[in-house]
Image (spheres, rainbow, N blue to C red):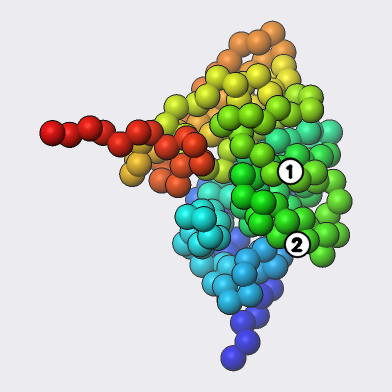
């Protein structure tokens, strides 16, 4: 029996995302408009709406729908916003942000992720995204600053250079800490440069490449 993707999408939104306090109608609309099943490998299409992280290769994962919903709601994107995404992954969150924001720049260290996401976004008719293969932890230098930066892999601590990529009156979403208990942080910056950090929820994600802490030395 073939899965009814539209019904599965509605169930995902109503039974997973909404109960996790995602109530922003623009976010729910974006999750309903972007076809999540088109952003996974063919053999995973019928698992695209399950409440689990799906494997992407290279030890990376596609975030759960509830995490994606919470990230989108926390960012509060508007049509004039320029967004930087660190970790393109499947391209699904990229697509959702592109429906909410003016433009998304998304980078990933894995060239095959970048290439696959580019093809998926083109098939979805999403053209306000620029993709690049780059390492955010080492040599990446963006062209300009952004209203929002979102990091889809974990870091032990929030790197200072992430803040340098932000405009005044901006926000940064990062998941930081030591596995298996990490915290999702939203840092908002005022036009005057004042910062406010808000702890949103706990989770556990793979670290960004070149971000994992060194193993503890034991005798």
Residue 156 in sight in this render? yes
- Label 2 Cα crowd, 10 Å radius (few <14 / some 14-19 / many 20+): some
Image coordinates of residue 175 in percent, x first then y, are: 49, 36
- Mark 2 lies on residue: 120
Image coordinates of residue 192 in percent, x first then y, are: 69, 8
Residue 200 in sight in this render? no
Residue name at image x 71 percent, y 60 percent: 116
Mark identifier at residue 86: none
Relative to residue 101, is residue 198 drawn left or right? left
- Label 1 Cα crowd, 10 Å radius (few <14 / some 14-19 / many 20+): some
Determine whether 153 is above or below 53 in the image.
Answer: above
- SS of the residue under disc 1: strand
Give residue 113's quadrant in the image: bottom right
Q: Residue furthest bottom?
A: 1
Give residue 126's quadrant in the image: bottom right
Residue name at image x 51 percent, y 41 percent: 209
Residue name at image x 68 percent, y 24 percent: 165
Q: Quadrant of the C terminus?
A: top left
Residue toward you, 109 or 119 = 109
Foreground tag (2 vs 1)? 1
Mark identifier at residue 132: 1
- SS of the residue under disc 2: helix
């Amino acid at each position: 029996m073939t899965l009814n993707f539209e019904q599965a999408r509605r169930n995902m939104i109503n039974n997973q995302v909404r109960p996790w306090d995602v109530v922003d109608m623009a976010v729910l609309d974006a999750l309903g408009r972007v076809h999540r099943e088109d952003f996974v490998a063919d053999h995973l299409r019928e698992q695209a709406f399950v409440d689990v992280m799906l494997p992407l290769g290279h030890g990376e994962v596609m975030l759960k729908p509830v995490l994606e919903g919470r990230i989108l709601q926390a960012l509060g994107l508007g049509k004039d916003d320029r967004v930087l995404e660190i970790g393109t992954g499947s391209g699904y969150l990229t697509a959702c942000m592109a429906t909410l924001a003016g433009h998304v720049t998304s980078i990933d260290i894995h060239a095959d992720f970048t290439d696959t996401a580019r093809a998926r976004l083109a098939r979805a008719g999403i053209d306000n995204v620029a993709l690049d293969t780059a390492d955010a932890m080492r040599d990446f230098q963006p062209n300009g600053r952004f209203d929002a930066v979102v990091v889809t892999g974990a870091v032990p601590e929030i790197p200072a250079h992430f803040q340098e990529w932000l405009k005044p009156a901006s926000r940064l979403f990062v998941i930081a800490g030591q596995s298996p208990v990490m915290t999702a942080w939203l840092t908002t910056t005022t036009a005057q440069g004042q910062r406010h950090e808000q702890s949103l929820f706990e989770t556990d994600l793979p670290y960004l490449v070149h971000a994992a802490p060194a193993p503890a030395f034991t005798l």
